[in-house]
Amino acid sequence: MASTIFKTPCTVPATKGLDREKYVGLRPFSSNLRFDCVKTGAMAWTRHCYKVRASAAHDGPTKKLGLSDAECEEAVTAGNVPEAPPVPPKPVAPAGTPVVPSLLLRRRPRRNRRTPALRASFQETNISPANLVYPLFIHEGEEDTPIGAMPGCYRLGWRHGLLEEVARARDVGVNSVVLFPKVPDGLKSPTGEEAYNENGLVPRAIRLLKDKYPDLVIFTDVALDPYSSDGHDGIVREDGVIMNDETVHQLCKQAVAQARAGADIVSPSDMMDGRVGAIRAALDAEGFQHVSIMSYTAKYASSFYGPFREALDSNPRFGDKKTYQMNPANHREALVEAHEDESEGADILLVKPGLPYLDIIRLLRDNSSLPVAAYQVSGEYSMIKAGGALKMIDEERVMLESLMCLRRAGADIILTYFALQAARCLAGEKSRELYE
Ligand code: PBG
């Protein structure tokens, strides 16, 4: 509804010139505070713009006069009211501000957004480093190799760079990681046996990490693609069909090998049918009842995975992943997957990618009592990095906002390549900015 605009000279005070932020935490009528009236003549657009603020360097409590409560009350009753700062003058609006009658509103939602302190009071969602899981790429080499499509990410040497990066993450409260191996081509095969080599890169890295940081939470990826000479998450039949049950058999062996090395949470990311139940049974049969399963419940056949596949050199050699990953057009199907995973014994349900799929995160949140995880994938990460590098967006603010939105949609935990950077921001100045 458009409000009527009166073309009259400005006499209406507005709050714009008043630096309300300065009142945060202050009790303006407390006699301990001295208020100074400062004429801010520099603001040419107002006629009388006074800024009233608490004196920055106030000299502690006012001197006591040694009066009793009764004497103080008596003085007030007798009309000797002690001085307190004056009511600040009404701030003046800029010349040309239309004079309009106040809207008769019973509710003005802006009242609860007026100051940083109020906004902090009514904030519905929060994010902490404890909610973040840090995906780390590892390789057999000794050096850390930068990943071109993911600025700031490296294939870390499993004996050096990996340990150092984990130490940095733990320093700022990120104590959960998920490992993705870059497997030498010579170890890849159509059936991906290397996935369950107990002395393979991932089990070795897990043992090393657990030796150094016993309380680190280690998630693993359960899927054949880094080990498959076809670059698919499952075994490929001669006619191109991805074989389900045979692949699940391999995944069970992979999950058990990871659990034996010390993984806390195994995460099947392949989207084969029935793998959660089968992996649960395999883990239990080997005495790994305590190892959790985070199921990639709703993993979509997404183009946002491009940079990741470059990082691991794991692009499918032919075709795409549409016969196992979900159609991005589908919503209800996520519920079908969620019901299956839940009944097969998943401990955590994951949605992937993150930001373009907030509705799916909310869908699972509203339809399951299990924790929900969101994966902010490589493409999401790289877009924010690129936008930041081109100075088109403020990288850190967009990063924190997108993580907050994933939480608001219903994600308990977020897998994100930003985990370390975000936790550093949350620990410092940027977090206050985000909340204000
Ligand atoms: C494969 C896997 C993929 C990712 C995690 N596990 C890629 C794929 O399905 O091809 C993608 C993660 C990302 O893009 O950040 N098992």
Image (cartoon, rainbow, N blue to C red):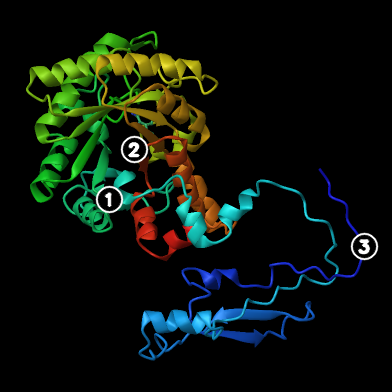
Q: Closer to the observer: label 2 or label 3?
A: 3
Question: What amino acid is labelled 1 in the image?
Answer: Val
* Residue 340 image position (x, y, % from top left): 33, 14
Q: Which mark is residue 7?
A: 3
Mark-to-mark CA distance, 2 and 1: 23 Å
Look at mark 1 in the image and give the residue it sits on. 174
Please give the name of the residue rendered at 13% of the width and 49% of the height, measured from the top-left corner.
Answer: 213
Q: Is mark 1 within 8 Å of ligand 1?
A: no
Look at mark 2 in the image and give the residue it sits on. 312
Q: Residues within 10 Å of mark 1 (few under 14, many from 20)?
A: many
Q: Nearer the viewer, residue 205 or 189?
A: 205
**Picture quadrant of residue 317:** top left
Mark-to-mark CA distance, 3 and 1: 58 Å
Q: Are marks 2 and 1 in contact (CB under 8 Å)?
A: no
**Picture quadrant of residue 393:** bottom right
Q: Earlier in the sequence, mark 3 or mark 1?
A: 3
Q: Closer to the observer: label 3 or label 1?
A: 3
As drawn, the residue found furthest toward the right would be: 7
* Residue 118 image position (x, y, % from top left): 51, 57
Residue 322 seen in render: no
Please give the name of the residue rendered at 14% of the width and 30% of the height, measured from the top-left corner.
Answer: 259
